[in-house]
Image: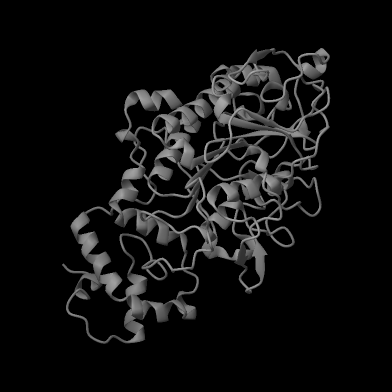
Amino acid sequence: MTSALDRLAWPMVRHSRRDWLRLGAIGLGGLSLPQLLRSRAHSEPARRAGTAKSVIVLFHSGGGPQHETWDPKPEAPDQIRGDFGTIATATPGLFVGELMPQLARLTDRIAVIRSMVTGDNAHSTSGYQMLTGMPHIPLSRENSAPGKPNDYPSLNALVQAVCTSRGGLPASIALPRGLANNGGQDPWPGTDAGLLGRKYDPWLLVCEPEDPTFTAPGCDLPEGMSTGRFDRRLSLLERVNSQIDGMERAAEVANYDIYQQKALNLIAGGAARAAFDLKAEPDAVRDRYGRTRQGQSVLLARRLVEAGVSLVQVHWANIDKQKPNSGGWDTHDKHSESLKGWLMPTFDQVCSALIEDLSERGLLDETLVCLVSEFGHTPKINARAGRDHWGRVFSIALAGGGIQGGVVLGATDKHAAEPITEPIRPADYLATVFDCLGFEPDTIVHDVEGRPLPLTRGRVLHELRG
């Protein structure tokens, strides 16, 4: 039996507006069709010959512990220094925390920023600043929700706006879960396109890539539909674009979900589908990253940038309710136990695997890797053997993509509590990311009302550029 959509594959005749609305309502293997049939073309802002083609952001939500990673203080008192020592690195004179031996071998490819400052001690509002470059109004407001006046677009959304999609994939993807308040129920501000409008929202891919049965969500064809039949339907739909363009403006179809365009592209594009096939990786490579959700998410990120995605942001996702602090970086309790037991071994393995893998594939020079979090941890260990939130100074690290390795920018006092050099702001970090991608920080995009917005108001950290 042929469907209504199949019958429309006969030679085209003029159809009424009602026919086109019916076509839009039919769905394609469970996907609604309005606004899905063609990615809207948008002009790409002027882009000079940048070093990086892609960016991978590893966002370790919960707070990165500067004392045990990039800014140890071995001469500080025990309650400041913590339980761990330091180790030498590939960079003469640079010492890092002893729990990152693999990354210590790679510091000649890594630039460390030790004086990052948000001045904000709340996850969602300090996170908003790291994601957008704009301070939240007000500061230090825990469980803050998206919306005015805190609706500046995220880095992901800005990349979506200025970079052209390639290979049937969106320009920007976040995975494997969202950054959210209240146990994962409500999204942070700064995780969407905000002022730019929904069409520039980055694609949030909620997934479990460590699952042996993992495939790209939404990529499976419906039961009984062959790839050939799907391709014939897609070919038909492409032929009616001119009709659909008019229909897209109709109120009846204005609310169709734009994310389904991305799902359609994935199903239609063989190369896009292939990017999600982790089984194509040798077991040795998968083991190198680790068979954890974090490890396989970062491996997936590497495959996605190879397939043409401009920015992949990976959120820390190894959540285990049986462990202190649910297994995450928000180590108010049992800080040292958490770091030594699971956090730092995974961090060291995954981050070093990504940098080495990209280097061996000849991709590190064109792929910027950012190791960041929303803030750091308090200098003093609390009564629960934990460290609390600290936005007054913390460390991040960058590698590849035009960044000069073996560089340390900024310094802190003897307790890693305050910067003693010029503070580096999130906007400066984001300006440097865009500079690596070939965009001037003051490149203009326009919000939904046509008002001009700069990509960022920060300064490029030329001290880090190779």
The colouring scheme, among rainbow, by chain, secondary structure or one colour, is one colour
Residue at x 75%, y 16% (from the top left corner): 82
User: Against 134, is 70 above or below?
Assistant: above
Q: Position of residue 156 (x, y in %)?
A: 56, 52
Image side of residue 285 versus residue 230, left or right: right
Relative placement, left or right, of 257 versus 386 is left
Residue 374 figure quarter: top right
Q: Residue at x 24, y 73 (%)?
A: 4
From the viewer's perspective, is residue 192 above or below residue 84? Answer: below
Residue 179 sits in which quadrant? top right
Q: Is residue 130 left or right of residue 59?
A: right
Q: Position of residue 11 (x, y in %)?
A: 17, 79
Quadrant for the C terminus, please.
top right
- Residue 462 spot, x, y in % from top left: 66, 43
- The answer to whether residue 81 is above or below residue 253 is above
One can see residue 308 in this view: yes
Name the side, left or right, on which 412 lies relative to 177: right
Numbered circles on residues, count: 0
Question: Which residue shows up at 76% across the image and 26% down it?
Answer: 387
The quadrant the N terminus occupies is: bottom left
Q: Nearer the viewer, residue 400 or 446?
A: 400
**Residue 334 visible in the picture:** no
Picture quarter containing residue 457? Answer: bottom right
Residue 372 on image: x %, y %: 63, 37
Q: Residue at x 67, y 25 (%)?
A: 70
Nearest the viewer among 292 and 436 is: 436
